[in-house]
Image (cartoon, rainbow, N blue to C red):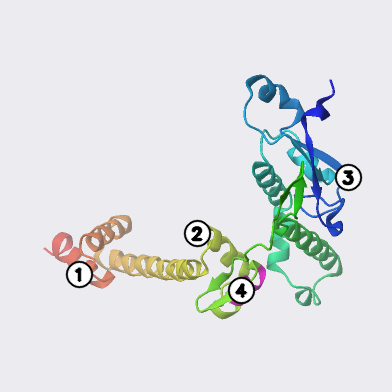
Amino acid sequence: MDYDKYFKPLRAIHSANFNTCFYCGCDATAQDYIPPISFIHEYTNSRSVADFIKVPACNECFDMVKFQRGSNLAERIDAAKHAIAKKYAKAIRVYEMWKLSELEEMDENFQSSLKGGLSLGEEATERLNFKGFDYEVDGEVNRVGPSETKKISVYEREFLDFKTALDHASETSRIPKHKLRELYYQNGRSFEKAIKSFHDMLENEEFEKQLKKLCIEFSKKHTQNSKFVIRTVRKLMNADKQLTINDALAKLYTLYVKT
């Protein structure tokens, strides 16, 4: 069956965008059908709403989305971006974490591997940031226009890209980039919350270390089970937030040890 008759071509308005993948900006070598031809009968038989357009795409984007059921251009763009981000997640991480200047003193083989990751990650990031181009479908013109750049804030400063923001946040907070990056995504994509979370973890680690040390000393001195002492101190401190570890130990002594 000649399925092509159902689809109208999406064409770039400006020559600079001819033969360009609408999804990522690479060279277009294929046509992506929306909805996919493999699902076309679901739309033609049920008269479901769909764009019925064919979009210039690179081979990779085409292969990554050809089995997606998206029936409109916006869904197809989201699917392509998600697939690129997932496929190149490791390279993107390398690109965000490292700078070429940081590789000079490393082993030659390690340098080569990281340089490859940097290059691939940078390319993947550019593809993810590509916003398409002005186009027309069946005589109707659609202007993509300049996209609004979402700035990333690190307290009082704003940055145009995540990599630069991560570098600054790591340098000023003295938190390793790999840990700060992880916390950034765990805390709603906020550097302020990520930095606070890191310091909270440090404080908690110090508290746990001190708690264990003092409770073990108390246990030895008064011939008590250390697990009982630690558990009871936690319970007392949870019941009264004003108590210090030493306060709780003193209360424990009065309640359970003193005869």
Give amino acid for label 2: Gly
Q: Is residue 255 left or right of residue 109?
A: left
Q: Say which of marks 4 and 1 sits in front.
A: 4
Q: Across the whole image, how many numbered discs are drawn on residues?
A: 4
- In the picture of the structure, the residue carrying the numbered disc 3 is 29
Q: Position of residue 221 (x, y in %)?
A: 27, 68
The residue that label 2 is drawn on is 188
Q: Residue at x 28, y 55 (%)?
A: 228
Asked if disc 1 and disc 2 are in contact, CB closer than 8 Å, the reply is no
Q: Earlier in the sequence, mark 4 or mark 1?
A: 4
Label 1 close to label 3 by CB (< 8 Å): no
Instruction: Kindly indicate whether the residue at mark 4 contacts the one at mark 3 (C-beta within 8 angstroms).
Output: no
Which image quadrant is residue 145 in? bottom right
Query: What label does residue 49 carry, if any?
Result: none
Q: Residues within 10 Å of mark 2 (few under 14, many from 20)?
A: few
CA separation, marks 4 and 1?
51 Å
Badge 1: residue crowd in 10 Å (few <14, some 14–19, many ≥20)? some
Q: Could you say which is closer to the camera, residue 12 or residue 116?
A: 12
Instruction: Tell me where residue 135 appears, x and y as whole percent.
Output: 76, 51
Q: Secondary structure at mark 4?
A: strand
The quadrant of the rendering that contains the N terminus is top right
- Give amino acid for label 4: Phe
Front in this rendered view, residue 97 or 58: 58
| Badge 2 vs badge 3, beta-carbon distance below 8 Å | no
Q: Which residue is mark 1?
A: 250
**Circle 4 sits on which residue?**
159
Q: Quadrant of residue 49?
A: top right
Left or right of 196, for residue 233? left
What is the C-alpha distance between the residues marked 2 and 3?
A: 38 Å
Q: CA distance from mark 2 to mark 4?
A: 17 Å
